[in-house]
Amino acid sequence: LLAELGGLGGAQPGVGGGVGHVGVLQESGDETISTISSCNTVWQRTVCVHTCRRERTMSNLTTHELDSPPWLRVESTLMATARLVRVAFDTRLACLDLNLTQASLLGYVNEFGATTQTDLADHLGIGRAAIGSVIDRLQARGLVERQPKPDDRRVWLVEITDAGTRLAAQVNDVDQVLRAELRNGLGREERQALAWVMTRLQQNLATAIAKTPISPPQR
């Protein structure tokens, strides 16, 4: 999230990849119940399977420029949605006493192994001082530990502990449920259209950043 949103963990920023990849599913008749137990709480999500479900088509989307919302509103909606995604994850992760940044770091180290603080800062898109504070909090809880890099003892590696691994599994479950809810009601064509637009916006922003002068213009 971070990683998508800034990258939690793996192929889908994993809350980089995604906070998690595994959910617990039980099938019964026409219902699928996803049961997640964390913080002594059992969450149940029941999804009804509609046999005659109609796929939404692109004809439902605006096709005329005059019908489209102003760009300012589009940009505001994008930023508001990104903030709301973070709030949603922070809310769901609160029972694990984690926020999205902490969960993203935990998920990434759990999936990819010992990682330097610099690499974690780059992956999560936050400063080195900030990543140090995040690691400190997780280490105080016994979820990660710092170890010197064997070939360069000036560099510290962040490793997950057994307790961290167990908590990362719960984070993955929370991630799976919330991601499913986030995508609810979006058909394939809508997802493809959204992916195309978001990719194009990212390319435009990367170009804009590359063209930005390093020093402020002279007056």
Image (cartoon, rainbow, N blue to C red):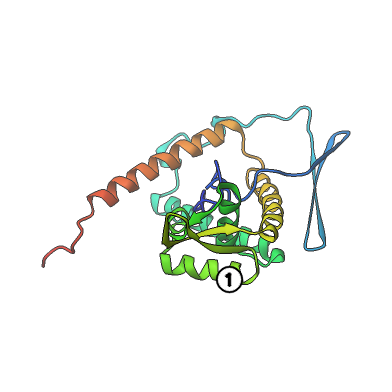
Q: Which quarter of the picture shows residue 27?
A: top right
Q: Position of residue 136 (x, y in %)?
A: 55, 70
Give the residue pinned by disc 1. 137
Q: Residue at x 46, y 60 (%)?
A: 117
Amino acid type for the residue under numbered disc 1:
Arg
Residue at 44% from the left image edge and 39% from the top image edge = 197
- Work out which quarter of the rendered image holds the C terminus and state it: bottom left
Q: Is residue 84 in view? A: no
On the image, the x and y values in percent for residue 8 come to 56, 51
Residue found at the far left of this picture:
219
Tag 1's secondary structure? helix
Q: Is residue 29 among what the camera can see?
A: yes
204 with respect to 85 (left or right): left
Residue at the spot 53% in from the left edge and 67% down from the top edge: 134
**Residue 47 found in image quarter:** top right
Judge whether 216 appears above or below 140 on screen.
above
Q: Residues within 10 Å of mark 1 (few under 14, many from 20)?
A: some
Q: Position of residue 119 (x, y in %)?
A: 44, 54
Residue at horizontal 42 percent and vertical 40 percent from the top:
199
